Image (cartoon, rainbow, N blue to C red):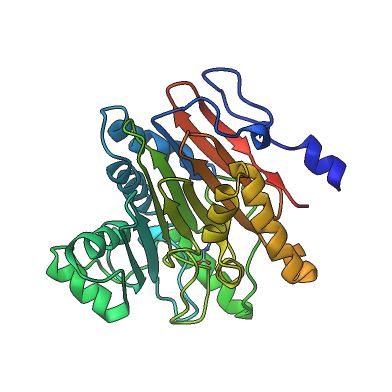
Amino acid sequence: MTTRRTFLEVMAIGLPLMACKNDVSAQKGGNTQKPIVISTWKDGEGVNKAAWEVLSAQGSALDAVEKGAVYMEDQINCCVGLGGNPDREGKVTLDASIMDHQFNCGAVAFLERIKHPISVARKVMESTPHVFLVGAGAQQFAVEQGFSLEEDVLSEKAKEDYEEWLITSEYKPVINIEENAYNHDTMGLLALDATGNLSGACTTSGMAFKMRGRIGDSPIIGSGLYVENEVGAVVATGVGEEVIRTGGSSFVISMMRQGMSPQEACKKAIERIVNVNAERAKEMQVAFIALDKNGNHGAFAIQKEFHYCIKSDVEEVMLESASWF
Ligand code: ASP
């Protein structure tokens, strides 16, 4: 297993603008690469392009991550945002969080009928004394801020998936394997801008067919997302309960603060999850991606077939993350 892990440390499958680094675990405080944006899953390619429009025009990391997340939420027949899979009552409920370089953060959860939860999260951060709004209160706030209430309908794909799920009505988190680009529920992205500031965003429809009212890791600052400008930024995807239990993203940051590279720190957080319950870990996917203040990046997942995308002046690449199994 170790041999395979070491062997597969990182496999480049995209077209890099320059030769792609094949062992990002070795990166530690090297040359600064900025601006740069990295994001989860194969869909990260389009997300990075949207974020890059901001970064390449000397825009802020915060604007860039919001723009990338909005792009994803607009893909209505996809898996994040209102096009995502519903809960077991057939309702789509959205979670999102955003964090900047000064510990400012905002989040929403259990939000219904709003197309851009990430922008509502940013409004919570910038226009309220709070960090986190949920459910009816989050929706009321969104409407007051001018967001429109969308129709309460499922996307075609979600309707099909839900009807199929209803046949057994059995809840079992699916391990997201990306045969196609759409088999995931969450988009997380991290950016370092030209001035050297980091920000991160995470947006999700949550685990498909979850209990009504269930909230995952994605909107929980320190679990699904964390940014500490002096150190780095981290975002998670996969079974949120495991990320919450282990304090995922802030754990990764604390490992980086102690000197680990982004990839080593992500691996340590995955090891922590596997150590909690190795049998349970075999049946699930969790992955972290991380970016440090110098633009070094890394990722680690429990299962293979987790990809992440990178875009900077010198790299435009999709990598398969190293994994535990
Ligand atoms: N982390 C998300 C949640 O638990 C789901 C995912 O990333 O697939 O809600």
Residue 136, given in percent of the width and then of the height, sits at: 27, 80
Q: Is residue 23 left or right of residue 51?
A: right
Residue 126, given in percent of the width and then of the height, sits at: 21, 59
| Quadrant of residue 153 within the rendered picture | bottom left
Residue 79 appears in the rendering: no
- Farthest front residue? 258
Indicate whether 156 appears above or below 55: below
Q: Residue at x 24, y 73 (%)?
A: 139
- For the image, the number of numbered tags is 0
Residue 240, given in percent of the width and then of the height, sits at: 55, 67
Q: Is residue 283 left or right of residue 182?
A: right
| Quadrant of residue 171 within the rendered picture | bottom right
Residue 176 appears in the rendering: yes
Q: Which residue is at the front of the view, 70 or 74?
A: 70
Residue 233, given in percent of the width and then of the height, sits at: 46, 48
Q: Is residue 277 left or right of residue 288?
A: right
Indicate whether 141 appears above or below 265: below
| Quadrant of residue 172 within the rendered picture | bottom right
- Farthest top residue? 18
Q: Residue at x 41, y 66 (%)?
A: 219
Q: Residue at x 50, y 79 (%)?
A: 88
